[in-house]
Image (cartoon, rainbow, N blue to C red):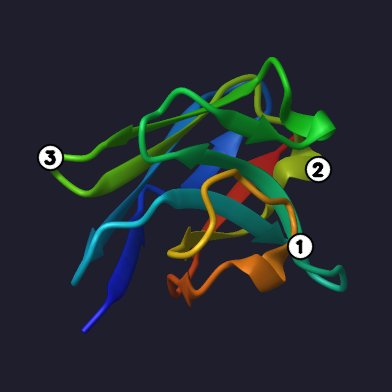
Amino acid sequence: QVQLVESGGGLVQAGDSLRLSCAASGRTFSIMGWFRQAPGKEREFVIAITWSGIYTKYADSVKGRFTISRDNARNTVYLQMNSLKPEDTAVYYCAADEKNFAPSADYVEYDYWGQGTQVTVSS
């Protein structure tokens, strides 16, 4: 059974940093990524990475502030968020794509999802 379990969310102040983790179980995935959804808004792509870790894809809104990495031995992907802003407030979802080899920003390409973790950035 495939499971994605996120951790690391919380309440921080603007300018702070936070690291989210997503531990996958059941199988490995070629692509893993993060999406987020703020209240009243649609789910949006944040960042994704290939199995090799060589190729990444970023949303323009997080370039220069967020980075993604993965530890394949632990089957875990990490989202390092620096210089957080109030507009980063959202539920962050880990996602896994088992069929593609290049990261996509389209949520329909992802096959498995975590339950989400809340990130709140106060001003």
The label shown at residue 46 is none
Q: CA distance from mark 1 to mark 2?
A: 9 Å
> Depth check: 8 or 36 in front?
36
3 vs 2, front mark: 3
> Hey, which quadrant is residue 66 in on the image?
top right
Amino acid at dot 1: Ala
For the point 62% across and 50% down, the residue is: 120
x%, y% of residue 95? 50, 62
Proximity of marks 1 and 2: CB atoms separated by less than 8 Å: yes
Q: How many marks?
A: 3
Secondary structure under the numbered disc 1 in the rendered image? loop
Q: Quadrant of the N terminus?
A: bottom left
**Residue identified by numbered label 3:** 73
Amino acid at dot 2: Glu
For the point 21% across and 49% down, the residue is: 75
> Hey, which quadrant is residue 58 in on the image?
top right
Amino acid at dot 3: Ala
Instruction: Tell me: 90 left or right of 54.
Output: right
Q: CA distance from mark 1 to mark 3?
A: 32 Å
x%, y% of residue 84? 66, 29
**Residue identified by numbered label 1:** 38
Which residue extends farthest left?
73
Instruction: Tell me: 92 left or right of 7.
Output: right
Secondary structure under the numbered disc 2 in the rendered image? helix
Q: Is residue 116 above or below residue 86?
A: below
Q: Sort mark 1 into few (<14), some (14-19) or many (20+) by Cα contacts within 10 Å.
A: some
The label shown at residue 87 is 2
1 vs 3, front mark: 3
